[in-house]
Image (cartoon, rainbow, N blue to C red):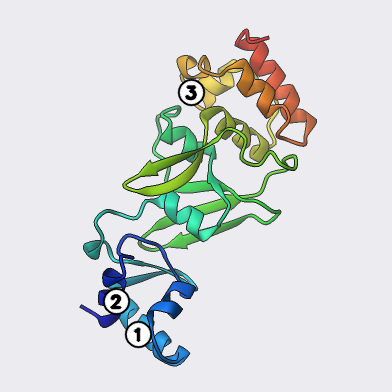
Amino acid sequence: MHSLTTKIIDQGLTNRIISNSQLVRLIDGSNQRRYGLVNRAAKTGELLRLQRGLYVLNDRFRDYHCHPFALAQALAPGSYISFETALAFHGWIPEAVQTTASVVPGRKSKRYEHDKMGVFSFHSLATQQGSFLELVSRHQIDGQTMLVANPCRALMDLICMRKLHWQGIGWLTQGLRIDQDSLRTITPNDISTLAFVYKHKRLKSFLSSLAQDLDLD
């Protein structure tokens, strides 16, 4: 086992996503020494580099797999899981989702691919100030904390990203394959909350039509 791997385990960071600042505190000596230890551990495969300054231990040293949702929030701090990823997580759509998709604060969208950890996409949406985390909940899986949009929020984030207009309830049940019973769990409070989240009138109109078809008015 590489000496850096031993240090990480001894410091209780086995299951953590490790930042460069943590490595600075962990490794004595010069920057060059730290770079050398990190590069050697990465070459042996014991330490996986997610992106510059962000690492995880190989699964064979961890107590559990590093969840892609937790990885996404480490790659883009302040983001939350949404779109089809959150809909699949909540069981609203039957298809497996290959990309972990998130909403990210700010204006810049980006995509990130890792040969071992998967594909991650981050999308910026036009939302009202102070409403970014409305209907977003905290979840824990294997001790890893992650923010995930509630189903209705994830659905409306998807509508917002794709710039879609209301096409009838059939588009949701047939196009997205969302079960009617799932849609029936949407509450009037969900509708009224989300009506103040998005900046575009198109979203307000979509929500109004959705509420009308679900008899929530």
Residue mark closest to the camera, 2 vs 1: 2
The answer to which image quadrant residue 12 occupies is bottom left
Seen at 52% across and 47% down, the residue is: 101
What numbered label is drawn on residue 37? Answer: 1
Question: Which element type, helix, strand or loop, lies under badge 2?
Answer: helix
Question: Which element type, helix, strand or loop, lies under badge 3?
Answer: loop
Q: Nearer the viewer, residue 79 or 154?
A: 79
Density class for disc 2 (Cα within 10 Å; few <14, some 14-19, many ≥20) is: some
What numbered label is drawn on residue 178? Answer: 3
From the viewer's perspective, is 127 left or right of 89?
A: right
Density class for disc 1 (Cα within 10 Å; few <14, some 14-19, many ≥20) is: some
The answer to which image quadrant residue 167 occupies is top right
Q: Position of residue 81 (x, y in %)?
A: 51, 44
Q: CA distance from mark 2 to mark 1?
A: 11 Å
Q: Nearer the viewer, residue 203 or 142?
A: 142
From the viewer's perspective, is 172 left or right of 194?
A: left
Q: Is residue 24 in view from this perspective?
A: yes
The residue pinned by badge 2 equals: 7
From the viewer's perspective, is 173 left or right of 57?
A: right
Q: Is residue 166 in view from this perspective?
A: no
The answer to whether marks 3 and 2 mark residues whose Cβ atoms lie closer than 8 Å is no
